[in-house]
Amino acid sequence: MTDSRLRDHLLGIGAAESELGGLSENDMIGLAGDIQISRGLDLSLEELADRCGMSVERVTALYNSFGLDADRLAGFGEGDIRMLMLMLADDLGLVDQVGAELFRVAGRSLRRMAEAAIAIYVQDIESHPDQQGADLIELAEMNAAASQLAVDFGDTLGTIFRHHMWTAVRDQRTGQPGDGPPELIGAGIGFVDLVGFTPLSRSLSPGELMELVGEFEQRAFEVAGQHGGQIVKSIGDEVMIAAPDHATVIAIVVALVSSFADDPAIRPCAGVTAGQVVFRLGDYYGPLVNLASRLVDIAEPGEVLTDRGATESDSDLISLRPAGQRSLKGFDVPVDVWLAEY
């Protein structure tokens, strides 16, 4: 297939002649996806502000609060108008009261989702055209289809968001003390870490490394969901888990650690605590969180270490064996530690 055929194909789906100058074949394949993502974003920043009756400065500031530079975006569409008009219709002033924090968290989370979504085509299609067994027009169509799938998926996320809100509200009410500050809740916290990950990563190809980390994170999400917990965040080769109580979080980390017992490449260990923690903007803070993080630092492969609070748990899934006192970074006195046996 000639370069001119791909060029004609891109012009036919909406590319401008000026966009094609000096592009490599890979870049031209990528442009097919870019066109799909930006389709319908025909308004300029000035036109968007005028349609919404807002100043350009106000619109720019709102997009900045989501972590976006409005001047660098492909354009704006009807969805942008609906979002901005919704904010204008906020008679209670909730956007001004909580908007900055909410937008920051949403922007950070959506950026991560976007980066995961683009891996479908930037890493898999654009980067390896010679391995796909297809001609360049077919690859461009695959890229466009993958981009449209990602966009359509994003448009349906309101349903999942509503389910998460339902669950989060109930978890907050269950864990929150009746007379305490609203940001203080009871929860179980666990950290699960891949022991020896750094030296192992040096011996793996980028593809093998991604596969290993992906398998670990996917297993963690599945196990946490099955037991009524959640993955708070992934930090490289480590995941942070939260659950309503000690018994639940121990059940989650034990299930996750033990599920890799026969896999020599993935050797997780865990640290667990539970009690009163500060919950803010989807994350957890406080001394007990720090303690769980320090416990995972000293755990051996396959171990689940916990603190004294676990001895009060009514879980029948595990037994606990005293593991002595340990000196932990950031703690003035040695901490009593128990080993969860499973």
Image (spheres, rainbow, N blue to C red):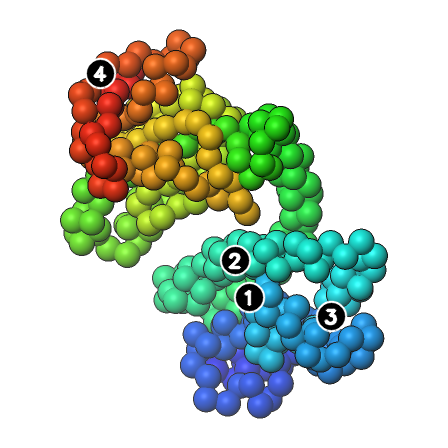
Badge 1 marks a residue whose secondary structure is loop
Amino acid at dot 1: Gly
Amino acid at dot 3: Gly
Which x, y percent locates residue 213? 33, 45
Which x, y percent locates residue 39? 68, 71
> Residues at badges 1 and 2 in contact (C-beta under 8 Å)?
yes
Q: Which residue is mark 4?
A: 322
Question: What mark, if any, has residue 108 been given in the picture?
Answer: 2
How would you rate the neighbour count of disc 3 (Cα within 10 Å): few for under 14, some for 14-19, many for 20 or more? some
Marked residue nearer the N-terminal end (2 or 4): 2
Question: What mark, if any, has residue 67 been given in the picture?
Answer: 1
Vertical comparison of 175 with 94: above or below: above
The residues bearing labels 3 and 4 have C-alpha atoms spaced at a distance of 61 Å
Vertical comparison of 168 with 177: above or below: below
The residues bearing labels 1 and 2 have C-alpha atoms spaced at a distance of 7 Å
**Residue at x 80% of width, y 79% of height:** 50
Badge 2 marks a residue whose secondary structure is helix
Task: Decide if residue 244 is in sight here.
Answer: yes
Badge 4 marks a residue whose secondary structure is strand
How would you rate the neighbour count of disc 2 (Cα within 10 Å): few for under 14, some for 14-19, many for 20 or more? few
